[in-house]
Image (spheres, rainbow, N blue to C red):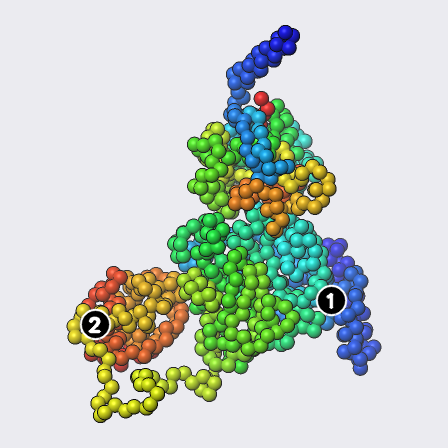
Amino acid sequence: MRTSTISKTVQLLALGIYSAGILSSCSTQTTQAEAAQTTEVAPDKMPTIMAELTDAPLVPAPITRKHAAKVVVKLEVKEVVKKLADGVDYTFWTFGGSVPGKFIRIRQNDEVEFHLMNHPDSKNPHNIDLHAVTGPGGGAASTFTAPGHETVFNFKALNPGLYVYHCATAPVGMHIANGMYGLILVEPEEGLPKVDKEYYVMQGDFYTKGEFGTPGLQPFDMEKALDENPSYVVFNGSVGALTGDNALTAKVGEKVRLFVGNGGPNLISSFHVIGEIFDNVYTEGGTKTQNNVQTTLVPAGGSAITEFKADVPGNYVLVDHSIFRAFNKGALGMLKVEGDENKRMYSGQIVDKIYQPEGSTVQEMPQSKAPAAAVALNKNSRMELGKTLFAQNCQACHQAEGQGIKGAFPPLAKSDYLNADLNRAIGIVAHGLEGQIKVNGELYNSTMPKLKLSDEEIANVLTYVVNNWGNKGGEVTPAQVKKAKASYKH
Amino acid sequence: MILQRLLLLMLLIGVCCKVQAQKSLPKNMVHVKGGTFVPLYGSDSTPVKVQSFLLDVYPVTNSEYLAFVSKYPKWRKSAVKKIFADENYLRGWASDLSLGANATKINNSPVVNVSWFAAKAYCDCQGKRLAKVEEWEFAALASETKANAANDAKFYQRSIEWYSQPNPTYLPPVQKSFRNYYGVYGMIGLVWEWTQNFNSAMVVGESRADVTMDRQLFCGSGSNGAKDVKNYVAFMRYAFRSSLKSNYTVANLGFRCAKSI
C-alpha cells in the first residue's frame, strides 16, 4: 500500500517534471526528448510501470514513451496439463500458463524489477534465464524459486533486441522440453518502425513416449530427447495452434511483423512463410537487418524478427522448412491475408496445357492429335492408374496410407466424410474446398486447392481411394464425375 | 592378550546391540542394509558408504502430525515462529488442531507444508532423526524387487513420469503408494521429502572451491561435477532440495524419520 502510494507520487512527479520540460521549451521538443533518452535518470525519479504481458500470438502494444522507466514484470510459473495435439495431452511447465511463455516488451535502458512466482501446486522448483539480462545466469542465479515462493531481482536492459528467456533449473533440458521458454523484446530507444500487425510465434520440439498422434496424456521421453529425435515440432505449443480458427490474419497492403523465437530444446528452425519473401529480417533478433530473405535460421535459444507486406490475398503457411517437421510433426502455421486480388502481382493459374519436350527445334505433329492420356478399360486398371495419380497429387497431404495428419489434413482412410457422399468428393477434387468440415469426429478448417485433373483422372484416383484403407469400395466413372462436377460447385 | 579380550568384548557388545536392535525394531520401521553407491553429487567420484540404518515405512501422515502438534503447542500453525516456518506452514489445515472439511480424505496422506525445523523437531520427539541425504538416496535406489534399480529403464521411466506430473488435489494415503524392496512406501511417486542435509549438493567444503562452483544447479554448470548426467530423476531431487531453505514449506514436500543402529 505504502509502496504503491510512493510510486504513484514518483510517477506524478516524473510526469510533472517531464511536462514542465515540454511546456517550457516547446520549440526544442526533439532535443528535450533526446536529452531524456541519453541521460541516466536517478532510480527514484523514474516512473514505475507494470509491464503488460500477452499470450502468443499476441504482442503488447509498441512502446511510445521516449524515456526509460522502471518496469515491474510479474511472471507466474505453472505446471499445467494441456493439449499438444488433438486427443494428445501433455504436462507443460509454463511461464504464465501456456507455451510459449508470456511476451514481455520493454525499452532499452529500462530498469526492470522482475518477480518470479512459482505456483504452490508446482511440483518442481524453477528459475528464469533471460537472454536480455547481463549478469550471472541471466537472472537464473537470483530466481531459483521453490514451489509456493516468489523471488525478485532487478536488471537494466542494456542491449536492444529480441531475446529468448527460459528456465534453467537442472535438469535444464527437461525444463525446456516441457515448454519453459518465451520471448522478451527490448525495443531500441528510437523504437521499431511502425507496422500494422505484430505477432508472436515460437517454435519448440517435444518428446513424448508415444509416437506423433498417439492419444492420451503423454509422458516426457528422455531417450528421445537425448537422441534429439522429437515426436512433435510445433509453433506456439501445440499442433494447430496457428491453423484454422487460430490462423494469424492480415489485410492486403498491411505490413506484418513476426517476432519469431525458438525454444528448442534441440532443433534449429529454418523459418519460412510459403509464398512470402521477408522484406526485412532482423537476423538472430539483433540490430542489423537483412533484406529479401526467403528462409531465416532461428537458433535454439535464439530469435529473428521478420517483416513483410501482405500484397496478395490467400493463405500463407508458416513452416520450419526442414519440411518433414512441418508435414509430419506439426510445425505448421497459417496467415490468412484478406483483400482484393492484384492479378499483376499474382495471376493465379492462367494456362494449363500438355508439355512435351521435343528437343531444341520446334516440331509440329502431323495432323494427328496429341496422344490422349491413358484410359482405363476396367475397374482394376482404373485403380492402377489412380494409384499413380494419388501418389502425384494427394499423398503429400493425405499421406501414403490415406491416414492424413491430425489437425491439418483430413484422413481418406475409413473416412466417414468421404464414404457418405462420393459425388461431393468428386466436387471437392474438381473444385477444391475451403472451410470447416468434420471427418471421423475431428474438425478440420483448411484449404484444399482444386486439382487440374481430367474427368477420367478424377474417376481413376477416386476409384483407387474408395477401394483402399477400409473404404466402402465401388467404381467411380468419368460419366459420374462429369455429372457430379456440375452439381457440386463450391 | 588384553587386546584380544577387548576385541572379543567389543564383538560381543556388537552382537548384543544387533540382536537387541532387531528384536526391538520399532513399529513401522524397516532395516535398510548398508552398502555403497555413487551419489549424483559428492565431494569426489568415489562411492559413498552408507551404514545400515532404520527407516520409517511411511512418510509422516497428517493425523500423526496432528497428534504431534497437540502434544507440542509451539509447533501449531498459530504459534510457530516465522524463522522456523514460513506463512504456508500447514497451509491445507483449517486451524491449529483441525484438518478441516477434507480430514477424512487426507488423514492418512503425507503431511506437507512443513519446514525442515518442524520435521526435525517431530523426529527428535519420536527419538528418531531425519535421514541423511545419502541414506535417503540409497534407499530410493530400490524398485519393488531390486535394492539397486539404478539401471532399470522401466523403473527409471516411471519415476520420471511421476516427477513430471502436477500434484493431485488430494495426496493419496501413504499405504497406497509404491512399496520398494525394503518394504518402504512412497519413496518415489508420493511427495518430495526433507532430509537432514539438503542444500549442500554443490558444496565441497573447501571455501575457495565453493566460491567458483554453482551451488544452484542452473544452466550448463548444473551438470558440472554430476556423476551421471543422464540421471534426471536424481537431478530433479537434488535441484528441488537446493531450492529450499530450512523455514520453507512446500505443498508437496513431506518427510519421514530414520534412526541409526
Residue at horizontal 34 percent and vertical 61 percent from the top: A441
Q: Quadrant of residue A89?
A: bottom left
Q: Is residue A125 left or right of residue A385?
A: right
Identified by mark 1, the residue type is Ala
Percent coordinates x, y for residue B161 in the rendering: 47, 45
- Specify which label sits upstream in the sequence, 2 or 1: 1
Label 1: element kind: loop
Q: Quadrant of the N terminus of chain B?
A: top right
Identified by mark 2, the residue type is Arg
Q: Is residue A421 something that shows in the picture?
A: no
Q: Is residue B76 above or below residue A189?
A: above
Residue at horizontal 62 percent and vertical 8 percent from the top: B5
Q: Is residue B241 above or below residue A312?
A: above
Q: Which mark is residue A382?
A: 2
Residue at horizontal 65 percent and vertical 70 percent from the top: A287
Q: Is residue B22 left or right of residue A347?
A: right
Q: Quadrant of residue A297?
A: bottom right
Residue at horizontal 68 percent and vertical 70 percent from the top: A188
Label 2: element kind: helix
Q: Quadrant of residue A480?
A: bottom left
Q: Which mark is residue B169?
A: none
Q: Residue furthest front?
A: A360
Contact, CB < 8 Å: mark 2 with mark 1? no
| Chain of the residue under the numbered disc 1 shown in the image | A
Per the image, the residue denoted by label 1 is A68
Q: On the same chain: label 2 and label 1?
A: yes
Q: Is residue B209 above or below residue B7?
A: below
Q: Residue furthest top?
A: B1
CA separation in Å, label 2 and label 1: 72 Å
